[in-house]
Amino acid sequence: MRSKTLQRSKRPLKNLYLDRSETPIGPFLIAVSEFGVVAIIQERKRSEHLERLRRDFDLQRSLPPPGPASQHMRAILRALSRYSAGKRETFESVTLDLRGTPFQLQAWRALRKVDYGETISYGSLAQRLGTKGARAIGNACGRNPVPIVVPCHRVIASDGRIGGFGLGLDHKRSLLKLEGVQLLERVDELLTSDSHYEKSIRFSYSLGSTSRSEHS
């Protein structure tokens, strides 16, 4: 199994550098530190996320990233460009500088092992991590600061529903289709709720295998 670059950060206040990138689901703000990519932020949620990042970083919007931060920015922008063009991008070249609970970091690390075009259920991922709660996996996905790179869009419900996605289910559906996952949606089974899991659509897909066993 290929190695993944994921760092747990408890460093003091550092500079954070911002740039913008187009993705298959719209424009995103990219935030990097000298240690890696910190966040990929949906444009419509930028105020909320930037306010949270100010707790840990000094935002440097107008300055070009120096040294290592520049390398991290180039790596993520290049990888997102390839992914947006429909290339089988693994994001192996992208180093992450993430902040989260020990369980969240463990879940995000496991998610990076779910390959392009593959899916896994919340329950199966919970079993791999030794936790009984699929809900805990859903919560970790909802807190994922780097969507697409940590591919929480590849996690689905064990009963065949598409599950939730913090960026919206239309975006989740678009990312899965970009990766070749064929969704056969049954509109008559549309479910709604008031949470960020706004919709769930039962679907089946035809990739032969829906998940992949990985080895540490």
Image (cartoon, rainbow, N blue to C red):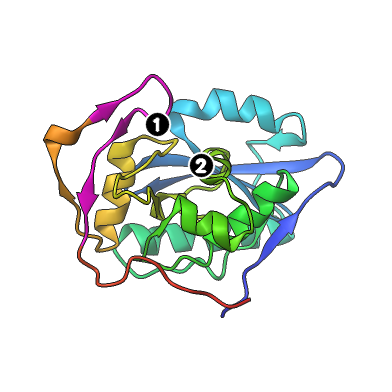
Query: Residue at left 66%, top 56%?
Result: 106
> Where residue 54 appears, x then y in whole percent?
72, 29
Task: Please report whichever mark, 1 or 2, sits nearer to the chain's N-terminal start.
Answer: 2
> Where residue 113 appears, x then y in whole percent?
52, 67
- Return the residue found at the far right: 12
Instruction: Tell me, yes or no, if residue 183 can be seen here.
Output: yes
Is the magenta region chiefly helix, strand or loop? Answer: loop
**Disc 1 target residue:** 197
- In the image shown, does 42 or 137 lie closer to the viewer? 137
- In the image shown, does 46 or 149 lie closer to the viewer? 149
- Return the residue found at the far top: 194
Query: Residue at left 40%, top 31%?
Result: 197
Looking at the rendered structure, the kind of residue marked 1 is: Tyr
Label 2 residue SS: helix
- Is there a contact, CB below 8 Å, between mark 1 and mark 2? yes
- Taking the image as shown, residue 153 lies to the left or right of residue 56, namely left
- The magenta span reads 191-205
Looking at the rendered structure, the kind of residue marked 2 is: Gly
Q: Which mark is residue 138?
A: 2
- In the image shown, does 62 or 53 lie closer to the viewer? 53
Label 1 residue SS: loop
Instruction: Tell me, yes or no, if residue 65 can be seen here.
Output: no
Query: Residue at left 65%, top 44%?
Result: 17
- Asked whether 196 falls inside the magenta stretch, the response is yes
Query: Residue at left 71%, top 54%?
Result: 66
